[in-house]
């Protein structure tokens, strides 16, 4: 187990009717809020009304910026930065899922920049460290990205077809309000994509070269099994509070950095998928269900014993240990079967994507980088082979 430092200040406010506490929480930290959200879903399901009522009850002044889309756009981030500066906003409330939260985080630190650019110097080049940001709070409506208590933010430059991430403790939200009832109205596909995203966060952390990290292994395995169990049940019974609660809480634990302490995760599959969704605007969770099995098939011989452990503990594979390759292939087959069972693609062709832009995406993945991945280090030729395995 590696040495580590762990810090996470996010206050989790979980349960029914918890949205009513939003105004009180914001009042502790700010006086004028940017209310940031996506399209019309929070107005249809009543979340918007609850948030506004809480802000007014606590006498919190607010301005609004809507329009966040999946794979959140840089252009809206720039609009939000200008709005925060003009309106002298001191707090940002993100109401929605990971895309809204990631956009809010970008606006939060971008609003304090003077001599550097939010995209070029941070997301693209990584030349600068993020040391300060406006405070961010969250009302989570989609369990998926885990951005409600993470250090990360992912933004898409829609003009350049590039998707990039930043990480900083300055971006961790101060609080996250999580009412599982807000998930009842989610479309099945959105629920499935969220489950895929959560599972991928766990798998990225699981495949590590660090040895003797048994507690984290067991916690990751348990969380993976939770998603495998409760995602189908949430789809079958969309208004069952118990099933929605399990998905929502697992999504937070999967990405608040607790489960990767003392180890270094891989993250190549995420970087590869970012090229896919940056180019084709495919849902992130759907892109991951395509990329992850292909990545596994490409790299598993690097440490076949770790994959055998994954197969046995997560997927209950009971084949003879004399044939480790068969065990791993059976696990990957079960992973693909799980994705299919919840309505997700497992091949590029399933999403209507052909081989035409594979070389371009593989080259784009290396812009500003020498390699991706930690479990196995990959270059553009490796990425191209993984994309072709996913056809």
Image: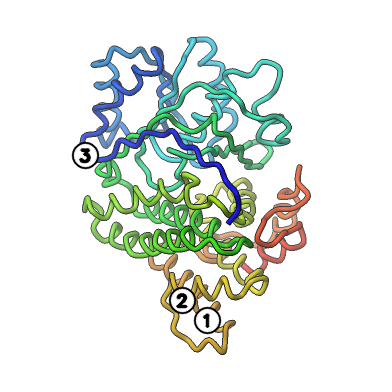
Report, in whole angstroms, how far the alpha carbon at label 2 lies from the one at label 3.
Answer: 37 Å
- Whichever of labels 2 and 1 marks the residue nearer the N terminus, that label is 2
On the image, the x and y values in percent for residue 179 come to 27, 40
341 sits to left or right of 388: left
Between 309 and 281, the residue placed more toward the observer is 309
Tag 1 residue: 327
Residue 342 can be seen in this image: no
Report, in whole angstroms, how far the alpha carbon at label 2 lies from the one at label 1.
Answer: 8 Å
Judged from the image, the secondary structure of the residue bearing numbered disc 1 is helix
Question: Label 1 near label 2: C-beta < 8 Å?
Answer: yes
Between 51 and 303, the residue placed more toward the observer is 303
Local crowd size for mark 1, using a 10 Å CA cut-off: few (<14), some (14–19), many (≥20) = many
Quarter of the image where the N terminus is located: bottom right
- Single out the mark in the foreground, 2 or 3: 2
Q: Is residue 122 depicted above or below 28 in this figure? A: below
Tag 2 residue: 312
Quarter of the image where the C terminus is located: bottom right
Q: Quadrant of residue 110?
A: top right
On the image, the x and y values in percent for residue 94 come to 42, 30
- Whichever of labels 2 and 3 marks the residue nearer the N terminus, that label is 3
């Amino acid at each position: 187990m590696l040495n580590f430092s762990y810090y996470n200040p996010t206050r989790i406010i979980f349960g029914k009717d918890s949205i009513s506490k939003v105004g009180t929480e914001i009042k502790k930290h700010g006086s004028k809020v940017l209310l940031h959200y996506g399209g019309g879903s929070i107005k249809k399901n009543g979340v918007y009304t609850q948030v506004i009522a809480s802000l007014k009850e606590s006498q919190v002044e607010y301005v609004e910026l809507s329009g966040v889309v999946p794979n959140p756009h840089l252009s809206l981030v720039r609009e939000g930065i200008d709005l925060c500066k003009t309106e002298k906003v001191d707090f940002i409330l993100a109401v929605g899922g990971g895309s809204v939260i990631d956009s809010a985080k970008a606006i939060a630190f971008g609003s304090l920049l003077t001599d550097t650019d939010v995209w070029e110097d941070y997301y693209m080049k990584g030349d600068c460290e993020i040391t300060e940001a406006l405070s961010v709070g969250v009302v989570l409506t989609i369990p998926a990205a885990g951005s409600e208590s993470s250090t990360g933010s992912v933004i898409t430059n829609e003009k350049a077809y590039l998707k990039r991430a930043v990480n900083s403790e300055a971006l961790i939200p101060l609080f996250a309000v999580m009412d599982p009832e807000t998930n009842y109205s989610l479309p099945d596909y959105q629920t499935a994509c969220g489950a895929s995203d959560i599972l991928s966060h766990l798998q990225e952390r699981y495949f590590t070269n660090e040895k003797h990290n048994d507690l984290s292994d067991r916690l990751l395995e348990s969380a993976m099994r939770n998603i495998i169990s409760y995602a189908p049940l949430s789809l079958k019974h969309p208004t069952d509070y118990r099933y929605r609660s399990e998905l929502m809480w697992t999504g937070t634990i999967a990405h608040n950095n607790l489960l990767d302490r003392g180890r270094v995760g891989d993250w190549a599959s995420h970087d590869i998928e970012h090229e896919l969704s940056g180019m084709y605007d495919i849902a992130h969770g759907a892109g991951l269900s395509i990329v992850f099995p292909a990545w596994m098939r490409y790299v598993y011989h690097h440490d076949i014993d770790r994959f055998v452990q994954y197969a046995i503990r997560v997927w209950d594979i009971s084949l003879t240990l004399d044939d480790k390759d068969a065990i791993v292939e059976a696990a990957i087959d079960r992973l693909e079967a799980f994705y299919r069972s919840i309505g997700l693609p497992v091949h590029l062709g399933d999403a209507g994507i052909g081989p035409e832009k594979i070389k371009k995406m593989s080259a784009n993945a290396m812009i500003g980088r020498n390699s991706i991945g930690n479990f196995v280090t990959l270059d553009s030729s490796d990425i191209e082979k993984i994309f072709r395995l996913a056809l």
